[in-house]
Amino acid sequence: MSDSSPSPEQASVSEQNAQHKGSSKRLVLLIGVLALGLAAFAYDRMIARPAVEAAYTAIIDSNQEMNRNTTEILTNDAVQKLIGKTPAETFQDENGDTVEVYKWRAGMPIRTHDLFAVYKQSGDKLMFFRVAMGKYETGSEISKFDTKDPIVIQLTDEDIANMSTDDGESNAAGGDAARESNAAERALEQAEQDAEDKENAATDPPATDPPATDPPATDPPAADPPATETPAADPPASAGDDSTK
């Protein structure tokens, strides 16, 4: 009767072959997982994330351009046409704003890149208000004044009295400080003016009186010649007068 059981050497070789095949399968599996991870990382960095960032930039630029050049508003319909995508989800913020959520599939199937477009009601339209990527923050988280309910601050009589006292002290201190500041400013201006006057006096040549000029000589008026009397002429002798008779 022959013995069909493998020899120890054959068993050792078979075991080594099995281990080698198992290692090869694990290596192939690891290489495949690594390749999928690299592909997902490349897709996320080169396609998904740039897409959501481009949509974010396009909305911001369009809103700024519209506000600068026209009186129209950027509506939710215009945003959808601008980025070529419809919202995956819509909800109402606690302050009444309408929020549209746009999603881009990330490299990992279970993750998405989200963009949140927030609108306020303007008549029968939704007017664009703000946009955010990643994590959404409510209106109250951004500003305590961006809430649906009005904020009422109740002051006590003690608070009002303290505010009045602080205002009075502040005004009094401010008045004294203002007067001191004005006096110091005037003194500084006067000192600068004095220094400028001294510098001008040192650099300007001394003023000299212009030489006196003699008035032009004037000729005395010519004296009138003495008047001369002409002798009176004797009347002519008449023919009938005979002085000898």
Image (tube, rainbow, N blue to C red):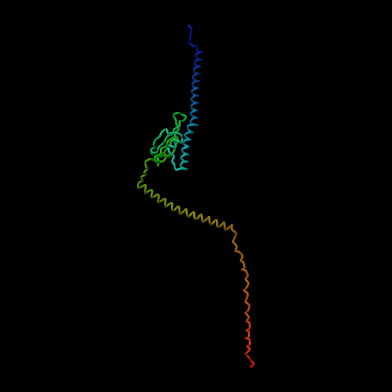
The correct choice, above or below, for 59 with respect to 183 in the image is above
Residue situated in front as seen by the camera: 55 or 134: 55
Expressed as whole percent of the image width and height from the top left, the position of residue 6 reads 49, 11
Expressed as whole percent of the image width and height from the top left, the position of residue 142 reads 42, 39
Q: Quadrant of residue 120?
A: top left
The residue sitting at the left extreme is 157
The correct choice, above or below, for 186 with respect to 219 in the image is above
The correct choice, above or below, for 98 with respect to 198 in the image is above
Residue situated in front as seen by the camera: 30 or 226: 226
Q: Is residue 44 left or right of residue 201?
A: left
The residue sitting at the top extreme is 1
Q: Quadrant of residue 95?
A: top left
Residue situated in front as seen by the camera: 130 or 69: 69
The residue sitting at the bottom extreme is 245
The residue sitting at the front extreme is 240
Q: Could you tell me how many numbered marks the image carries? A: 0
Expressed as whole percent of the image width and height from the top left, the position of residue 90 reads 40, 34
Expressed as whole percent of the image width and height from the top left, the position of residue 34 reads 49, 26
The C terminus: image quadrant: bottom right
Residue situated in front as seen by the camera: 234 or 216: 234
Q: Is residue 99 left or right of residue 226?
A: left
